[in-house]
Image (cartoon, rainbow, N blue to C red):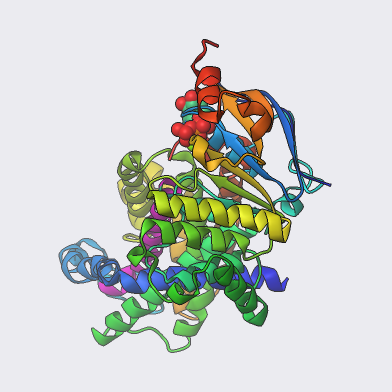
């Protein structure tokens, strides 16, 4: 089954075209990197996938649920980490997760079990009672990912989850999410503008000025040049 | 159904927690009506001619007259304040958490409004308590009957706040809009003067007051405090509440693209 399907998606902010005929799909259990420079349209795509706003052009399907027709089923299958943090800094890690669980209608023992599992999964259990405010950037991001896993989504969307993190934290989080795909069969869409977060066997979609420039495995796309060179060549070229 | 209640509870608890952290907000929300009660009422007292109007059965002092209006003021200010926090949440991104939940959006927004109302109602009771300590008391059962009136008024004004928040793109514009909403709403109502008194100065003013849904919320509270029921006021408040809820939902409809704005 396809985890995520994007078909002929288009979107404009007023006169500004942000996405143009974007199509790709991600198999269930795959890690798909969405690589694109600033302004490529990554966050716009994420906002459409999470139905923060809608478009009439094209279609989005999450685990077989069309977002326009069955938004609630689709949203129930999605876990999302936005580019900008949405943690409540005055709450502890665990309480952040609890609040989120409740917004998904989960409470009581069921919620607690899931929360513990998600914290465990992101190696955040020891810090569960710390205030979000007191965490470093890497741990905040891990908390956000753990939170996005609480309702056991099938598709995980991450919009530049490593922004502002040091090299070690970046590597750890990238590895963590790859691991989630490999072992739990989660489908991940990982937006970034950093080529070193893409592993050779990953699915890769390169987005630039709202268009898909390349779609395949990272290895194929990188070719002989290496991914960084290839990416710069593709996105540096006049459009 | 359980899922809906779970979410409602969490949203209310979060609002209560946030509120308990901002003690200054609680205090300032109480000080405002108390200042009116103590300072202004003394000055205005002479200005209010005596007359017996329902629900009162005897002559009343001006202080007594404005207590329901000041309860309304608490609801009004809090409704606007929580819409301010919505704009803030939107700019800070935490609104996204709410909007990407698979539960129905109308329910989540309604829960937000109820959460704000719960806080307002607590403040109203604190205010009524202080007023009672100052000697302005109501019939005992009035304090019970007023509860549904306060909740209804709180929801109506909270919905107005949410609706407004969806039409205000940024924090900066907020203060201006609030001045244009809060003050006319409050002054052109029966909070400070009864309708007949308004009519003496201008018929137009009286008509505006009679039309203003806030007047009806104040009257609903006033009558309830005196153990009486005002059907007309109830109807108007509910009608306005429904319209504002509709606007609030429409305002946050994903097709309208509110969240499209940067932030
Ligand atoms: N609210 C908005 N109004 C107008 N234009 C916008 C708005 N948000 C984004 N854009 C424009 O749409 C395009 C795509 O923006 P988007 O935020 O989706 O890019 P991005 O790939 O996420 O970039 P970044 O790496 O900077 O996060 C950009 O040209 C941007 O300037
Ligand atoms: Mg972005």
What is the number of callouts on the image?
0
The one of A199 and B61 positioned closer to us in this rendering: A199
What residue is shown at x 52% (from left), y 68% (from top)? A123
Magenta stretch containing residue B77, yes or no?
Answer: yes
Residue A145 in view (yes/no): yes
What residue is shown at x 49% (from left), y 34% (from top)? A193
Residue sitting at the far top? A238
What residue is shown at x 23% (from left), y 83% (from top)? B134
The one of B178 and A138 positioned closer to us in this rendering: A138
Give the vertical position of A86 relative to B149 (above or below): above
User: Quick check: A162 left or right of B43?
Assistant: right
Q: Position of residue B263 (x, y in %)?
A: 43, 40
Q: What is the span of residues highlighted in magenta in the rendered image? A: B63-91
Q: Position of residue B71 (x, y in %)?
A: 37, 69
Give the vertical position of B148 relative to B179 (above or below): below
Residue A16 in view (yes/no): no
Give the position of the C terminus of chain A as an image quadrant: top right
Where on the picture, by quarter, is residue A198? top right
Q: Position of residue B4 (x, y in %)?
A: 67, 68
User: Quick check: B22 left or right of B75?
Assistant: left
Magenta stretch containing residue B80, yes or no?
Answer: yes
Give the vertical position of A16 relative to B100 (above or below): above
Magenta-colored segment: predominant secondary structure: helix
The one of A196 and B106 positioned closer to us in this rendering: A196
User: Quick check: A149 left or right of B181?
Assistant: right
Q: Position of residue B81 (x, y in %)?
A: 37, 57
What residue is shown at x 51% (from left), y 80% (from top)? B145
């Amino acid at each position: 089954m396809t985890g995520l399907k994007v078909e002929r998606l288009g979107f404009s902010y007023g006169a500004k075209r942000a996405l143009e005929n974007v199509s790709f799909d991600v198999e269930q259990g795959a890690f798909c990197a969405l690589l694109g420079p600033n302004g490529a349209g990554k966050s716009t795509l994420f906002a459409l996938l999470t139905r923060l706003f809608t478009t009439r052009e094209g279609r989005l399907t999450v685990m077989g649920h069309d977002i326009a027709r069955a938004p609630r089923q689709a949203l129930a299958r999605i876990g999302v980490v936005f580019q900008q943090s949405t943690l409540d800094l005055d709450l502890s890690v665990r309480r952040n997760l609890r609040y989120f669980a409740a917004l998904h209608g989960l409470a009581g023992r069921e919620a607690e079990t899931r929360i513990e599992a998600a914290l465990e999964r992101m190696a955040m259990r020891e810090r569960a009672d710390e205030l979000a405010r007191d965490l470093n950037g890497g741990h905040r991001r891990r908390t956000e990912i753990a939170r996005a896993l609480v309702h056991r989504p099938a598709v995980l969307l991450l919009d530049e989850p490593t922004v502002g993190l040091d090299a070690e934290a970046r590597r750890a989080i990238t590895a963590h999410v790859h691991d989630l795909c490999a072992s739990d069969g989660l489908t991940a869409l990982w937006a970034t503008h950093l080529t070193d977060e893409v592993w050779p066997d990953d699915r890769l979609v390169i987005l630039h000025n709202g268009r898909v420039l390349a779609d395949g495995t990272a290895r194929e796309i990188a070719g002989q040049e290496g991914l960084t060179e290839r990416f710069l060549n593709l996105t540096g070229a006049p459009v | 159904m359980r899922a809906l209640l779970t979410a409602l509870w969490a949203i209310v608890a979060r609002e209560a927690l946030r509120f308990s952290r901002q003690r200054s907000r609680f205090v300032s929300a109480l000080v405002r009506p108390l200042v009116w009660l103590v300072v202004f009422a003394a000055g205005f007292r002479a200005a209010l001619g005596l007359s017996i109007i329902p629900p009162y059965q005897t002559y009343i002092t001006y202080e007594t007259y404005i207590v329901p209006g000041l309860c309304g003021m608490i609801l009004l200010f809090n409704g606007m304040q929580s819409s301010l926090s919505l704009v803030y949440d939107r700019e800070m991104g935490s609104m996204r958490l709410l909007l990407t939940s698979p539960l129905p959006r109308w329910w989540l927004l309604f829960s937000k409004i109820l959460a704000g109302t719960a806080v307002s109602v607590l403040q109203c009771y604190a205010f009524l308590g202080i007023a009672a300590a100052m000697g302005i008391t109501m019939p005992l059962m009035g304090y019970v009957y007023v509860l549904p009136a306060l909740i209804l008024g709180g929801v109506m004004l909270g919905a107005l706040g949410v609706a407004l928040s969806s039409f205000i793109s940024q924090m900066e514009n907020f203060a201006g809009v609030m001045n244009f909403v809060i003050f006319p709403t409050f002054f052109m109502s029966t909070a400070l003067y009864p309708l007949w008194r308004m009519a003496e100065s201008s018929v137009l003013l009286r008509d505006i007051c009679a039309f203003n849904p806030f007047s009806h919320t104040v009257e609903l509270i006033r009558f309830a405090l005196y153990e009486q029921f005002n059907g007309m006021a109830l109807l108007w408040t509910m009608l306005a509440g429904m319209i504002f809820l509709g606007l609030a939902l429409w305002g946050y409809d994903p097709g309208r693209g509110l969240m499209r704005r940067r932030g």
